[in-house]
């Protein structure tokens, strides 16, 4: 069943809650876990979600509820879906960093 998002610029958290079929506190929790969801805040600190936020939340809900991913698994899947490179330090990179650190320490010892 395809969820229809109304044609609006902004949605309040209650509206998003109804669209997604989850409670408001779940949406607030997902905000903390998934950095791709960034609602705009009004002066009175109310959250206003753009259509792209609602679409991202629908994707997150699908990953968590339909495809049964964990939070970490859903994060990795979102990265994979976007074709982004995960920020991992490879063993080779770690060795290079250690070598650079040693050289910097030697330079500091020469200066001191």
Image: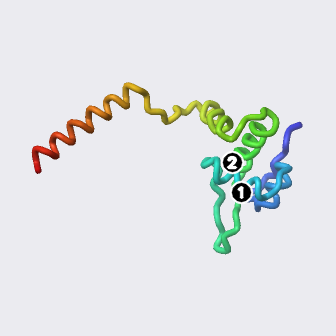
Point out residue 6 in the picture as x, y percentages from the top left corner. 82, 52
Circle on res. 52: 2
15 lies left or right of 76 = right
Left or right of 56? Residue 96 is left
40 left or right, relative to 58: left
Q: Nearer the viewer, residue 101 or 3?
A: 101
Which residue is labeled 1 in the image? Answer: 28
Kindly indicate the quadrant of the structure image that contains residue 109: top left
Locate residue 65, reporting x and y percent: 80, 39
Please tell me whether mark 2 sits on a helix, a strand or a loop: helix
State which quadrant residue 9 falls in: bottom right
Q: Residue furthest right?
A: 1
Which residue does the image show at 10% across and 44% down from the upper left? 110
Foreground residue among 17 and 33 = 33
The residue sitting at 74% across, 40% down in the picture is 59
Query: What percent of the width, then of the height, locates residue 42?
Result: 66, 69
């Amino acid at each position: 069943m395809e969820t229809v998002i109304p044609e609006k610029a902004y949605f309040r958290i209650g509206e998003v809650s109804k669209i997604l079929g989850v409670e408001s506190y779940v949406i607030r929790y997902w905000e903390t876990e998934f950095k791709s969801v960034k609602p705009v805040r009004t002066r009175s600190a109310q959250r206003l979600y753009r259509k792209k936020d609602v679409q991202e939340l629908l994707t997150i809900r699908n990953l968590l509820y339909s495809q049964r991913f964990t939070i970490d698994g859903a994060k990795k899947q979102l990265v994979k879906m976007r074709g982004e490179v995960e920020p991992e330090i490879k063993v080779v990179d770690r060795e290079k960093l250690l070598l650079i650190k040693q050289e910097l320490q030697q330079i500091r010892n020469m200066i001191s």
